Image (tube, grey):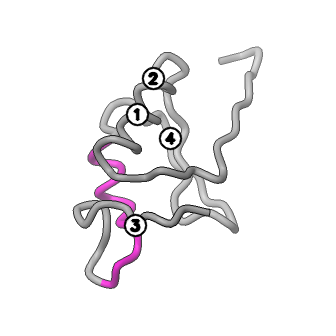
C-alpha cells in the first residue's frame, strides 16, 4: 500500500483517480481498457511500451505503488 497520494492532476474533484486523466497521460501506449471488479481503471498497453508506461505512471502521475500489474502473452497477439 502506498503512503503517497497521486499528483493532483491525476485526481478528480472528489480526490479519486481520474481515469480520463490517466488515459490522456498514457496516450497511444494504451491498446484497450477493461472493466474489473477490483480496479477503477484497467488498461492494456503495447508490449513495447510497458516500461515507458510504468515510468510515466510513477514520474508524471505520482503513483509509487501499482498493486495490480499483470502480464499475459497470447499466441495470436
Q: Mark 2 points at which residue?
A: 49
Q: Residues within 10 Å of mark 3 (few under 14, many from 20)?
A: some
Question: What is the spatial separation of the Cα atoms under label 4 and label 1, in whole angstroms?
Answer: 19 Å
Which type of secondary structure does the marked residue at label 1 adopt? Answer: helix
Q: Which of marks 2 and 1 is in front?
A: 1
As displayed, is residue 13 above or below residue 19?
below
Q: Name the residue under label 4.
A: 32
- Mark 3 and 4 residues: CB-CB less than 8 Å, in contact? no
Of the numbered discs 2 and 3, the one sitting upstream in the chain is 3
Which type of secondary structure does the marked residue at label 3 adopt? Answer: loop
Identify which residue is drawn at 29% across, 57% down. Answer: 21
Of the numbered discs 3 and 4, the one sitting upstream in the chain is 3
Q: Is residue 24 magenta?
A: yes
Residue 53: give x, y in percent of width and height. 43, 33
Decide if residue 24 is on the left or right side of residue 29.
left
- Mark 2 and 1 residues: CB-CB less than 8 Å, in contact? no
Q: Which of 6 and 68 is in front in this view?
A: 6
Query: Hey, which residue is sitting farthest front in the picture?
Result: 3
Question: What is the spatial separation of the Cα atoms under label 4 and label 2, in whole angstroms?
Answer: 13 Å
Q: Is residue 5 magenta?
A: no
Please give the label number shown on residue 55. 1
Q: Quadrant of residue 58?
A: top left
Residue 46: give x, y in percent of width and height. 50, 25
As displayed, is residue 59 above or below residue 49?
below
Of the numbered discs 1 and 3, the one sitting upstream in the chain is 3
Of the numbered discs 2 and 1, the one sitting upstream in the chain is 2
Q: Name the residue under label 3.
A: 5
Amino acid at each position: 500500500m502506498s503512503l503517497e497520494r497521486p499528483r493532483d492532476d491525476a485526481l478528480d474533484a472528489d480526490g479519486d483517480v481520474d481515469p480520463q486523466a490517466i488515459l490522456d497521460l498514457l496516450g497511444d501506449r494504451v491498446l484497450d481498457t477493461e472493466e474489473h471488479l477490483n480496479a477503477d481503471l484497467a488498461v492494456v498497453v503495447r508490449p513495447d511500451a510497458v516500461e515507458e508506461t510504468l515510468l510515466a505512471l510513477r514520474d508524471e502521475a505520482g503513483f509509487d505503488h501499482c498493486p495490480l500489474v499483470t502480464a499475459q502473452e497470447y499466441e495470436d497477439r
